[in-house]
Image (cartoon, rainbow, N blue to C red):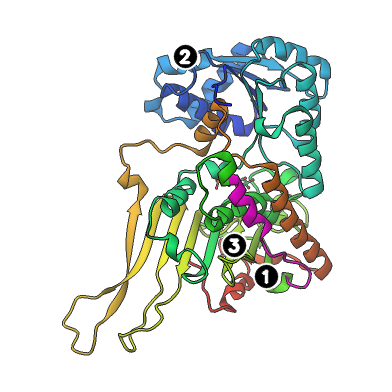
């Protein structure tokens, strides 16, 4: 499907994601002339308001989340002019007729569902009943898409009853991040790395997504999920798949997603017998972030909880390319800094001709956040006459993406994903078989935790998780890259 759509229907339009990300992203696209000329954005949510009131809400969101110099009045006015609002209780099938009427032309319609999972079923049924699921309609779904394989299947079945896979766009916002695609450019746009990109050249891989924030008022959702399901099931496994996949023949939805799903299906199950050696759960207690005291998770939540706010895993991709190469994953809330990075640690040189001088193996470091950076550590000779033998030192070769492309505005992930949805491009959206392979692996870990009685170990907010997370890698002679 390559026809750009003429209508965008936004569910959950008054919610936090819409205000922080979706409306500002759509505005950014509009300001740069990237939205189709006649595109109308029909917003809907439960709140009873009219189009004028919604435009005021949208204008406030832009004021809050878009820099002043980008908020040119004529551009803002044009954007607000695209917006219409129809209140809807998704549990009331009758309400969908008014929505369909507001949409009008359904021959090229994109629908974005950013609603509670409990509303997915009734919303999809309502859309289909009102003629909003015809061949010109595509549907984007925002997480959480279930909390385990069974519930994710139920959602996928409900979606599939109205929208075929070719018109279903499952969002993982990490796939919209610039550096994530830069990983593909680096791997498949350069001849340099691919010959080493395997068990012969790589010692191990580390993927870290660290956050300083805590519960952020999301207790109802987060305490039912925990770090494993909130972050590993989706974002971290997608990063792992992109690092580990075979070179796709083309940058198209089938080629890329076929390769990712093979990796996800090759993940070695972590079960009751291996959870102790391969996983660590943690929960933050009181501590300090950036010098400011913060509460512990249970205190923030208002009750004791067994859920993990930190998880570290040692994963293996059981195939020819990755035989014996550990993938260490860790993510958590209330860690010392906001940092997302992928570290590829290459093998040491087989023999050093420099005698005792220690040689450090090369590392490729892809930083996603807070700054986009690609770094490669190399051994170089330290200046000097070296009467007692050469002295070598590890030096970084850094490409700060912000400097290399200083004249280009950095876009947030949702700008790219919304534009891809509007233009019908599926490569950066997650296919059903990927999601199900991800849940299969995650469910086994949770079952293993239950069976082996693995509980969340405490860590003080502002630390890199429980000490067991350090032991997880140190046992293999590996240190986390902090
Ligand atoms: C979301 C999780 O998917 O990703 C949040 O639900 C998390 O808990 C967020 O904070 C992190 O996204 P980013 O883009 O800020 O790294």
Q: Is residue 343 visible?
A: yes
Left/right placement of residue 38 relative to residue 388 reads: right
* Quarter occupied by residue 104: top right
Q: Residue furthest front?
A: 249
In terms of secondary structure, where does tag 2 sit? helix
Q: Is the Cβ of the residue at disc 2 closer than 8 Å to that at disc 3?
A: no
The numbered dot on residue 428 is none
Residue 56 among those drawn in magenta:
no
Q: Which residue is mark 3?
A: 329
Q: CA distance from mark 1 to mark 2?
A: 54 Å
> Mark 1 or mark 2, which has the lower sequence index?
2
Q: Which residue is mark 1?
A: 278
Left/right placement of residue 318 relative to residue 58 reads: right
Left/right placement of residue 57 relative to residue 365 reads: right
Can you say whether 89 is above or below 215 in the image? above
Q: CA distance from mark 3 to mark 1?
A: 10 Å
The structure residue drawn at horizontal position 36% and vertical position 82%, both measured from the top left corner, is 358
Q: Which residue is mark 2?
A: 78
Q: Position of residue 447 (x, y in %)?
A: 80, 61
Stretch in magenta: 257-274
């Amino acid at each position: 499907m390559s026809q750009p759509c003429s209508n965008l229907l936004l569910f959950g339009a008054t919610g936090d994601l819409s205000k922080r990300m979706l409306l500002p992203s759509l505005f950014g696209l509009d300001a740069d002339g990237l939205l189709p000329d006649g595109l109308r954005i029909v917003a809907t949510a439960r709140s009873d308001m009219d189009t004028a009131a919604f435009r005021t809400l949208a204008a406030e969101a832009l004021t809050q989340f878009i820099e002043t110099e980008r908020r040119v009045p004529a551009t803002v006015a044009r954007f607000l002019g695209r917006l219409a609002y129809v209140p809807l209780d998704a549990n009331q099938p009758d309400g969908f007729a008014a929505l369909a009427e507001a949409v009008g032309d359904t021959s090229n319609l994109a629908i974005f569902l950013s609603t509670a999972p409990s509303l997915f079923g009734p919303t999809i049924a309502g859309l289909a009943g009102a003629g909003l699921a015809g061949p010109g309609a595509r549907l984007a779904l925002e997480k959480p898409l279930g909390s385990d394989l069974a519930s994710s299947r139920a959602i996928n079945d409900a979606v599939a009853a109205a929208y075929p896979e070719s018109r279903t766009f499952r969002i993982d916002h990490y796939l919209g991040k610039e550096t994530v695609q830069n990983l593909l450019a680096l791997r498949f746009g350069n001849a340099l790395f691919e010959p080493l990109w395997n068990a012969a050249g790589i010692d191990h891989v580390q993927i870290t997504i660290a956050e300083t924030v805590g519960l952020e008022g999301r207790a109802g959702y987060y305490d039912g999920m925990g770090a494993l399901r909130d972050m590993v099931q989706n974002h971290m496994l997608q990063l792992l798949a992109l690092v580990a996949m075979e070179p796709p023949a083309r940058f198209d939805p089938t080629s890329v997603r076929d390769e990712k799903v093979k990796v996800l299906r090759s993940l070695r199950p972590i079960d009751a017998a291996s959870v102790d050696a391969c996983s660590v759960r943690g929960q933050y207690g009181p501590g300090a972030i950036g010098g400011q005291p913060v509460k512990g998770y249970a205190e923030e939540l208002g009750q004791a909880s067994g859920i993990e706010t930190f998880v570290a895993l040692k994963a293996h991709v059981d195939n020819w390319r990755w035989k014996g190469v550990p993938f260490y994953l860790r993510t958590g809330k209330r860690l010392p800094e906001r940092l997302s990075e992928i570290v590829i640690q290459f093998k040491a040189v087989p023999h050093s001709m420099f005698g005792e001088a220690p040689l450090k193996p090369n590392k490729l470091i892809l930083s996603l956040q807070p700054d986009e950076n690609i770094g490669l550590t190399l051994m170089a000779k330290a200046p000097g006459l070296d009467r007692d033998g050469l002295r070598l030192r590890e030096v970084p070769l850094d490409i700060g993406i912000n400097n290399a492309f200083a004249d280009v505005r950095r876009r947030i992930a949702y700008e790219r994903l919304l534009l891809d949805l509007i233009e019908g491009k599926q490569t950066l959206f997650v296919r059903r078989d990927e999601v199900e392979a991800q849940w299969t692996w995650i469910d086994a870990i949770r079952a293993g935790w239950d069976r082996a009685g693995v509980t969340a170990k405490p860590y003080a907010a502002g630390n890199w998780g429980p000490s067991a997370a350090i032991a997880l890698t140190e046992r293999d002679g590996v240190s986390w890259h902090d």
